[in-house]
């Protein structure tokens, strides 16, 4: 009898304990894991919509409100961070970036902070002295304005006349300088003829100057020893640390292949990925249908299965850049002779081929990015997107045009009409003292619609911001915010702003760096806002951008970065 009741009593106790434990776990699950309180938190929903506190459970924002109301939700295990009145927003979404290339640059000659040829020389010399064991000296970051002719040559870069091959790309990645040793390895001489998209630049005597434009860079690049997977992963880890320190919690790569994608998958598997990553596969006129079919398989199997990695975009290039006169223009370049063969720029592929490829990848359900810097390139891309609306099956599309440094006023309204997103980089629109190579090339007639952010917004277009790192002066979104709002460089030049009629408000710029990037990738219902149900990617600023003078924006730093509900960067006191 005792045994019978003892047995059933034990079963009763076990059942009771199980129920109580379940209730405890349920209550614990409902308790926030993290609370941010006493802040000035911009939700992003409206231009001046703020709350004081956020409750986060695991990786999701569960409630927002006053500090008092959110404090009442805390439990014994809830971590609480007092924001001390600081500004907080959703994390930055860098919607056009070359993250692997930029990360690799952190282990090479890095000239993005150089402000003159003198800086280029001293920084490169120091790197060479510290890396005498390297087989090649590689890097990027020089600016066209550093050189009297707009391009480096063996005379200005005489200090690189060493036994090591040197190959350093311009800040925008569209030109590169190769020293004499590198040219010798590549077999480039006065007799070299390059007939593709680009140029082996030669002097008046027909000798190579060392500068290579666009695809001609490949003549040397193919001799640079390839990096190992371990090298690339180590570089990406450095890049992720940098991104965290700048408040970047989402990135959308602007070019790549399956091997690049696999690196990010590896980091995710190892729980080291601290950004949400969207891949865009590069397609050009020589890309095979078999390759595109493989991209489609990756899109369907990887692109939409989780909240960390997606692979549903295709990247095209329809032209080059203004500085090297390779961007496609509707009217001739202002600084080229009337008989110049490149006076309208150099499209990267026949427009008919581009149109066919756009139609094909649109049919396969991809989002499309098209690099188009010249006003003619922008029009060609808009025309291609318009054609798929008429010819392909109806569906919601969010195709984009990248850069749009110049645009015809006649094409501005077409973005909203066609639901095409304007994807642009404020950091490219930073004038220096005196007339730039860029300005001389486009001429005064096109200047009013250069980097036309306000005109595009006023027309109803969706504006998406990014860095284009490392093909830009900086990856820092705060620097981009400064340029977008003031139209000046970090030093406040020029006074009053460069083409000031195209500057935009702080809320508009913040939206372009947060919510609009999420919208472009069909993720607007889960990130880009501080709202219940959204992923907990939140950043905190050292200064309140809504309260300081706009010319002080560039002095602001990120103090705290929260990714997926976890603190990944913390400089709070």
Image (cartoon, helix red, strand yellow):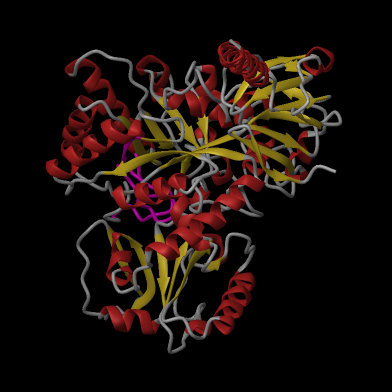
**Of the pair 56 and 503, the residue shown nearer to us:** 56
Residue at (27%, 81%) from the top-left corner?
189
Picture quadrant where residue 84 is located: top right
Q: Predominant secondary structure in magenta?
A: loop
Is residue 417 shown above or below 141? Answer: above
Does the rendering let one see residue 147?
no
Q: Position of residue 503 (x, y in %)?
A: 63, 30
Would you say 183 lies left or right of 162 here? Answer: left
Tell me the quarter of the image containing the N terminus.
top right
**Magenta highlight on residue 368:** no
Is residue 145 shown above or below 388? Answer: below
**Of the pair 230 and 426, the residue shown nearer to us:** 230
Tell me the quarter of the image containing the C terminus.
top right
Residue at (28%, 55%) from the top-left corner?
339
Q: Among all residues in the image, which is located at the extreme bottom?
A: 163
Picture quadrant where residue 313 is located: top left
Q: Position of residue 216 (x, y in %)?
A: 29, 64
**Magenta highlight on residue 332:** yes
Would you say 556 lies left or right of 187 here? Answer: right
Residue at (62%, 41%) from the top-left corner?
477
Residue at (16%, 49%) from the top-left corner?
286
**Of the pair 124 and 522, the residue shown nearer to us:** 522
Which residues are the magenta region? 311-339
Q: How many marks?
A: 0
Is residue 251 shown above or below 68? Answer: below
Q: Position of residue 572 (x, y in %)?
A: 80, 42
């Amino acid at each position: 009898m005792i045994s019978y009741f003892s047995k059933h009593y034990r079963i009763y106790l076990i059942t009771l304990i199980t129920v109580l434990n379940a209730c405890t776990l349920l209550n614990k699950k409902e308790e926030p894991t993290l609370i941010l309180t006493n802040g000035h938190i911009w939700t992003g929903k409206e231009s001046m919509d703020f709350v004081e506190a956020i409750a986060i459970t695991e990786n999701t924002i569960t409630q927002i409100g006053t500090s008092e109301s959110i404090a009442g939700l805390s439990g014994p295990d809830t971590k609480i961070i007092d924001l001390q009145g600081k500004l907080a927003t959703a994390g930055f979404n860098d919607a056009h970036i070359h993250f692997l290339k930029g990360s690799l640059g952190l282990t090479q000659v890095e000239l993005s902070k150089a402000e003159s040829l003198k800086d280029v020389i001293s920084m490169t010399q120091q790197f060479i002295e510290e890396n005498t064991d390297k087989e090649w000296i590689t890097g990027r970051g020089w600016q066209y304005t550093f050189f009297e002719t707009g391009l480096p040559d063996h005379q200005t870069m005489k200090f690189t006349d060493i036994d090591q091959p040197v190959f350093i790309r311009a800040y925008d990645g569209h030109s590169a300088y190769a020293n004499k040793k590198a040219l010798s390895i590549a077999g480039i001489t006065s007799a070299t003829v390059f007939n593709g998209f680009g140029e082996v630049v030669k002097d008046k005597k027909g000798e190579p100057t060392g500068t290579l434009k666009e695809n001609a860079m490949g003549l040397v690049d193919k001799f640079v020893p390839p990096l190992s997977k371990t090298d690339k992963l180590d570089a990406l880890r450095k890049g992720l640390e940098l991104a965290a320190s700048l408040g970047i919690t989402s990135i959308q790569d602007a070019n790549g292949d399956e091997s690049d994608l696999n690196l990010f998958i590896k980091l995710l598997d190892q729980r080291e990925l601290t950004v949400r990553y969207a891949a865009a596969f590069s397609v050009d006129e020589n890309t095979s249908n078999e390759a595109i079919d493989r991209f489609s398989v990756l899109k369907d199997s990887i692109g939409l299965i989780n909240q960390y990695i997606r692979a549903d975009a295709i990247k095209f290039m329809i032209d080059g850049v203004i500085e090297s006169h390779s961007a496609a223009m509707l009217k001739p370049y202002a600084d080229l002779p009337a008989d110049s063969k490149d006076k309208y720029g150099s499209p990267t592929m026949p427009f008919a081929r581009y149109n066919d490829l756009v139609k094909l990848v649109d049919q396969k359900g991809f989002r499309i990015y098209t690099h188009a810097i010249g006003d003619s390139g922008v029009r060609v891309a808009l025309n291609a997107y318009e054609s798929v609306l008429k010819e392909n099956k109806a569906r919601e599309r969010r195709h984009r045009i990248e850069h749009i440094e110049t645009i015809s006023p006649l094409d501005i309204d077409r973005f909203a009409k066609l639901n095409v997103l304007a994807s642009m980089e404020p950091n490219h629109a930073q004038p220096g003292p005196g007339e730039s190579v860029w300005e001389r090339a486009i001429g005064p007639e096109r200047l009013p619609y250069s980097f036309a952010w306000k005109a595009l917004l006023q027309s109803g277009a969706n504006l998406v911001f990014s860095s284009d790192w490392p093909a830009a002066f900086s990856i820092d979104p705060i620097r981009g915010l400064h340029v977008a709002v003031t139209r000046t460089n970090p030093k406040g030049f020029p006074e009053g702003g460069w083409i000031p009629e195209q500057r935009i408000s702080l809320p508009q710029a913040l939206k372009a760096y947060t919510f609009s990037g999420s919208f472009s990738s069909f993720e607007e219902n889960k990130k880009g806002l501080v709202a219940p149900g959204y992923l907990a990617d939140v950043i905190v600023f050292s200064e309140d951008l809504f309260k300081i003078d706009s010319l002080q924006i560039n002095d602001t730093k990120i103090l705290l970065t929260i990714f997926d509900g976890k603190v990944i960067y913390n400089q709070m006191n």
